[in-house]
Image (spheres, coloured by chain):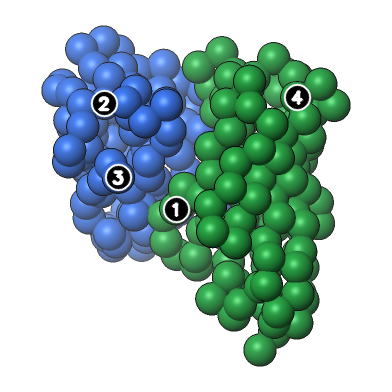
Chain colours: A green, B blue
Amino acid sequence: KQEVTQIPAALSVPEGENLVLNCSFTDSAIYNLQWFRQDPGKGLTSLLLIQSSQREQTSGRLNASLDKSSGRSTLYIAASQPGDSATYLCAVRGDDKIIFGKGTRLHILP
Amino acid sequence: GAVVSQHPSWVICKSGTSVKIECRSLDFQATTMFWYRQFPKQSLMLMATSNEGSKATYEQGVEKDKFLINHASLTLSTLTVTSAHPEDSSFYICSARDHQFNEKLFFGSGTQLSVL
């Protein structure tokens, strides 16, 4: 059974710093991994999608990496801004099911 | 990018009533839609997978007679919470998979259900 873990559960950093969010999964037989952000009481916004054959994806200040063999993904946020404050979720797809981690609540201090 | 519209955004209802939530893919055909529930400060929990033209597949512990899912067309799936009770109060989110976008998931904006 696939389990997805996100560490840390919460993170506060000063504005301007670079930061890394971690996601680990127990079953490496995945099709893809997707990172989302969720603002309080809102739906999810897709940030980056990494196929199982890919190592990383980049979009603006965001970079996501995938190491399938070790069951890990990281989301790197460069030059953080207060608007980046949100909960970040990773989701792993395997066997037509998508399993979410519990998320990392990120707070960027102005 | 693809857009998924979910309606209503929030609903308050009396205990014992039924509530229907709609999820539409606006500019793509979604053969598969997913329904999630999220309690405060918890992660999204998959409730069921909805395939167009067939019965939904429910996750363990989710009552299929209580959470009725209909996916009658390639652009619309509905979730009906029947005989709602206060413990059903939660944030419900639908998502659809767009095969033209490398299987990327797109989410609706969610529905906050409060049962009095």
Between label 2 and label 3, give the one nearer the viewer: 3
* Residue B100 in picture, x, y percent from top left: 32, 26
Chain letter for mark 4, please.
A
For the residue carrying disc 3, how many other residues have a C-alpha within 10 Å: few (<14), some (14-19), or many (20+)? few
Residue sitting at 26 percent across and 26 percent down?
B30
Q: Which residue is mark 1?
A: A45
Q: Which residue is mark 4?
A: A68
Give the residue type at disc 2.
Ala
Q: Are dots 2 and 4 on a single chain?
A: no
Q: Earlier in the sequence, mark 2 or mark 3?
A: 3
Q: Judging from the image, what secondary structure is the residue with disc 1 in?
A: strand
Give the residue type at disc 3.
Gly
Q: Is residue A22 left or right of residue B106?
A: right
Mark-to-mark CA distance, 1 and 2: 18 Å
* Residue A32 in picture, x, y percent from top left: 58, 26
Q: Is residue B37 left or right of residue A3?
A: left
Whether residues under marks 2 and 4 lie with C-beta atoms below 8 angstroms apart, the answer is no
Residue sitting at 17 percent across and 38 percent down?
B27
User: Where residue B1 is drawn, which disc sits there?
Assistant: 3
Mark-to-mark CA distance, 4 and 1: 23 Å
Is A64 drawn above or below residue B52 in the view shown?
Answer: below
User: Where residue B3 is drawn, which disc sits there?
Assistant: none
User: Where residue B30 is drawn, which disc sits there?
Assistant: 2
Q: Are dots 1 and 3 on a single chain?
A: no
Chain letter for mark 2, please.
B
Q: Judging from the image, what secondary structure is the residue with disc 2 in?
A: loop
